[in-house]
Image (cartoon, helix red, strand yellow):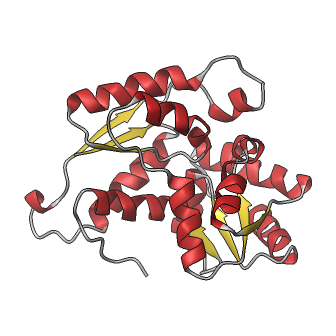
Amino acid sequence: MLGILGGLGPAASCYLYQMLIDHTPATCDQDHIDIVISSRASTPDRTAFIVGKSKDDPFLVMEQDGKSLVAYGATVLAIPCNTAHYFYDRLAAALPVPVLNMPRLTVAEARAAGCKKLGILATDGTLLAETYQLMCAEAGVECAVPSPEHQRGVMAVIYDQIKHGKRADMNLFNAAADDLKRQGCDMAVLGCTELSLVKRDEKLGSFFIDSTEVLCKNALLACGVQPIGFD
């Protein structure tokens, strides 16, 4: 049984759930995997805590919900929030079941696809925590982040648009992507699950690797299902 530690934010969790359904080779209800979802949207903001703007520690809520998912029967957990992986080591140590590491899996897939230098599109919290930078170093992949100006644009897309249920301002998004290309990146990770919704809505090309897609594939594999429908 897959446990989804969600609500971080709700739209990203909903998208992962739909993606799991869409990429399962099923001809009846019983062919789908069993999933239990915790969507605690009231979890304190991860970026605000990491950058020091809030003293409300999200880990305490995440740990509680992780244990609740396990008590319900979850045998593997997925967290559809890249920024929340700042707490990954503490959470994995606190729980008796495997917790999928979305950033590590995503960088591994980018490397397997031939990526030499990965651009990182993510929240300020994820960049400050160096979540993807550390995974890139571990995998032997170079990386780059947007300039401060373009990072502000990325944050506006995430917090002012996607989290408000709006479509992304593609001028802001593309400006950040172009900045990464100028820095020599041959791929860029959608390292915030809200940015995965940009790929869904705007039909982004092969330059982008979607962390939610990677999480979906590996969650299905962990539950004994061979995913279908991914390019």
Q: How many marks?
A: 0
Q: Quadrant of residue 172?
A: bottom right
11 lies above or below 112: above
The front one of 17 and 78 is 78
Residue 27: x and y, percent?
Answer: 11, 70
The front one of 174 and 88 is 88
The front one of 108 and 4 is 108
Tell me what residue is drawn at x 33 percent, y 33 percent: 96
75 lies above or below 50: below
Q: Is residue 95 visible?
A: yes
Looking at the image, residue 157 sits to the left or right of residue 17; the answer is right
Q: Quadrant of residue 223?
A: bottom left
Residue 224: x and y, percent?
Answer: 22, 62
Looking at the image, residue 174 sits to the left or right of residue 77; the answer is right
Residue 211: x and y, percent?
Answer: 53, 60
Tell me what residue is drawn at x 11 percent, y 58 percent: 29
Q: Is residue 169 visible?
A: no
Of all residues, the one furthest to the top in this rendering is 55
98 lies above or below 29: above
Quadrant for the C terminus in the image: bottom left
Tell me what residue is drawn at x 47 percent, y 47 percent: 80
The front one of 211 and 178 is 211
Residue 138: x and y, percent?
Answer: 65, 59
Looking at the image, residue 121 sits to the left or right of residue 13; the answer is right
